[in-house]
Amino acid sequence: MGEDNYSLSSRVFHTIRENILSGKYATDEELKEKNIGEELGVSRTPVREALRQLELEGLVTIIPNKGAYVVGISKKDIQDIYEIRSRLEGLCAKWAADKITKEQLDELDENIYLSDFHAAKGNSEQVVELDNRFHEILYNASDSKELKHVLLDFHHYVQRVRKITLADPKRSVQSNQEHRQIVEALKKHDAGLAEKLANEHMMNTIHNMDNYGWDNLFQ
């Protein structure tokens, strides 16, 4: 496969995956190659390749002689992801405590300031984007491209959960306060505390969803 074909297949794959994870395509919905190809302006070949790759990821099931259907993300999937992610985010913060730079700490401080500002204004989209950036800075600070790759993937998989929880003003303020505590531990280069706080930060999201949000995802 040539580079152009690979790039095209990759773009189609990421677009379909994004549509599944964002909820544009509903669970059990049939994904028709012809319709998706027309929507994306591509032939059926890259769509077929993307659907096969999505089946490997568990987001799509392909039934021979019938078609491809959305599997999506279940409540248990999300809970499992956050349980795993809590451990990995803790490891990330632990490593970052030893390797984080002054520039990265300054950027985290600015991120927290802006998050407080936008949370007070009710700008949930900006809060989500700043949350993305906060974790990306931490991933970079861990100085592990392998850990960063895994965490970015998990971060993307639970985007709907994050958008719902961070749209709640109370949770967005609490989340940013948890970010602030993590940064203070990083400034002290306290790896154990940073790990503990990052781990708890992830689990608090699941506890928050238990309070009010699961029906918004699985309706």
Image (cartoon, rainbow, N blue to C red):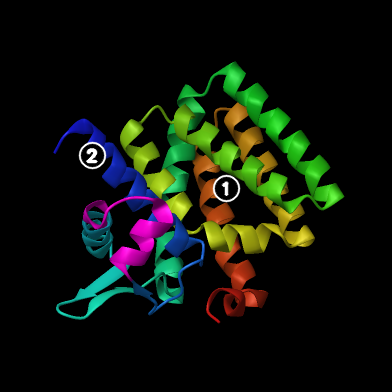
Q: Residue at x 51, y 67 (%)?
A: 23
Between 120 and 197, the residue placed more toward the observer is 120
Between 17 and 218, the residue placed more toward the observer is 17
- In the image, residue 213 sits, relative to residue 103, either above or below, namely below
Q: Helix or strand or loop: what does disc 2 sit on?
A: helix
Say what amino acid the circle numbered 2 marks: Tyr
Q: Which residue is mark 1?
A: 197
- In the image, residue 199 sits, relative to residue 83, either above or below, namely above
Residue 214 percent location from the top left of the image = 58, 76
Between 114 and 34, the residue placed more toward the observer is 34
**Magenta extent:** 32-46
Q: Which residue is mark 2?
A: 6
Say what amino acid the circle numbered 1 marks: Leu
Q: Which quarter of the rendering shows the C terminus? A: bottom right
Q: Quadrant of residue 53?
A: bottom left
Q: Residue at x 60, y 17 (%)?
A: 102
Whether residue 203 is visible, yes or no, is no
Extreme residue in the top direction:
102
Q: Which quarter of the rendering shows the N terminus? A: top left
Residue 114 percent location from the top left of the image = 76, 36
Q: Quadrant of residue 205?
A: bottom right
Q: Would residue 122 appear left or right of 8 to someone viewing this image?
A: right
